[in-house]
Image (cartoon, helix red, strand yellow):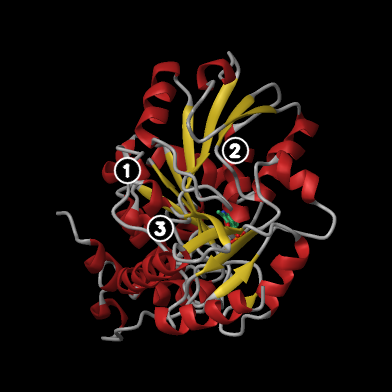
Amino acid sequence: MQYTDEEICTQFWDDPSQYHGSVSPPIYQTSLFAFKSFKEFTEAQKLERENYVYSRGVNPTVQILEQKLAALERGEKCKCFSSGMGAISAVFHTLLRSGDHVVVINNIYGPTTELIHYLSKFHISYSVVDHQLTNIYEAIQENTKLIYVESPGTMLMKVVDLQAVTKIAKEQGIVTAIDNTWSTPIFQKPLTLGFDLSIHSLTKYIGGHSDVIGGAVIGDQDLVDEIFQYGYQLNGAVLGAHDAYLINRGLRTLPIRLKQHQENALNVIEYLQTKDEVASIYHPSLVKKDSPYLDKQMKGFTGLLSFELKEANFLSVSRFIDALSLFKIGVSWGGYESLVNSPVKDNNEQQLNEQGISPGLIRLSIGLEGSELQIDDLEKAFQQL
Ligand code: PLP
């Protein structure tokens, strides 16, 4: 039976009758599980990824979240981690060995790029392909073992034709993984488009309240079991039961929150389009016309966007950001609160140009306060320019 996303978020796998009628499942705040007999204990240990033995394995509270995320992504299995980077590292460490090569598509989250670069220490190499898949065939080598995509990508939110990627990867027998954090499984389900693994930072929309850090990997049972055994249990980036409880709580309202993030973001974009001071706006909703595949792969748009000031320099960016008050200055995104950030520093203009990023780029995470208040705040900042 196929549950709707709303059912999965609110009801699936947390049956109150299992917990004395409690509609909020208990937090199994335990590091280990005790057994009635030594025989039972040794039997359970034979399959630690299925049995409750130690919480650097399976924990019932974390498992509720894993079951829900697997169902939302239409995947067989999910493993949660203590952060998005914990999940990403586990995938790379499990799937790659010395001599392997990775193809990276689109603008990737900075620390993920650093990780891939760091893997050269273990003789793992990589090539980068842009979001339009220019030169993808040239980038693939005999030793390419993984294609890693972020779509929409970091900072400029560029989108990739996901089915085009999986078609090429399948022809060549290469495993595919995607960072699906921007869309969440509510708006994009990459496994249904042929991806082998979908990865999340649960810290963003899924947690949704900026009070917890977590990550997840979803895919076929065999692949996730392999990641469990190596990248998860040996690297040890374990999601705690209390954090899993908070993320589960966030998940219950995810579909409804996303609708509001989307509505607010579209209103803010409409407003930004009227401003002479703005050179460009970046959000997947704006490239729908030129990306016919988008309707097939995305059901909606979340609230992370960026735009460029025409006066593209550190001083203008600082002046604009400092004039905001509703938008808080900070890293991360996807929470209830509006946030502003920029990659621009007083000494990195050349570096940004090399990455195709304007020294006037500002990123907004559009929160739930309402677009009227958000636009008011932005208008005050434009007046300061
Ligand atoms: N992926 C993307 C696209 C991100 O923006 C981030 C964090 O900002 C991560 C992964 C890493 O997640 P975490 O901070 O939970 O480790």
Q: Residues within 10 Å of mark 2 (few under 14, many from 20)?
A: some
Is 321 or 172 nearer to us in this picture? 321
User: What label does residue 184 carry, if any?
Assistant: 3
Q: Position of residue 105 (x, y in %)?
A: 54, 35
Q: Report the residue at 58% width, 21% height from top.
A: 144
Please tell me whether mark 1 or mark 2 is closer to you in this view: 1
Query: Furthest residue to the top?
Result: 142
* Lower sequence index among marks 1 and 2: 2
Q: Report the residue at 58% width, 68% height from top.
A: 213
Is 112 or 269 nearer to us in this picture? 269
Please tell me whether mark 3 or mark 2 is closer to you in this view: 3
Q: Residues within 10 Å of mark 1 (few under 14, many from 20)?
A: few
As helix, strand or loop, the secondary structure at mark 1 comes to loop
Residue type of the residue flagged with mark 1: Lys
Q: Position of residue 13 (x, y in %)?
A: 29, 67
Task: List the residue tagged with mark 1.
Answer: 289
Q: Report the residue at 60% width, 66% height from top.
A: 332
Task: List the residue tagged with mark 2.
Answer: 94
Q: CA distance from mark 3 to mark 2?
A: 24 Å
Which quadrant of the view contains residue 108?
top right
Please tell me whether mark 3 or mark 1 is closer to you in this view: 1
Q: Position of residue 380 (x, y in %)?
A: 58, 82
Is 268 or 213 nearer to us in this picture? 268
The answer to whether residue 222 is above or below residue 212 is: above
Residue type of the residue flagged with mark 3: Thr
Q: Position of residue 301 (x, y in %)?
A: 37, 58
Which quadrant of the view contains residue 16?
bottom left
| The N terminus lies in quadrant | bottom left
* Lower sequence index among marks 3 and 1: 3
| The C terminus lies in quadrant | bottom right
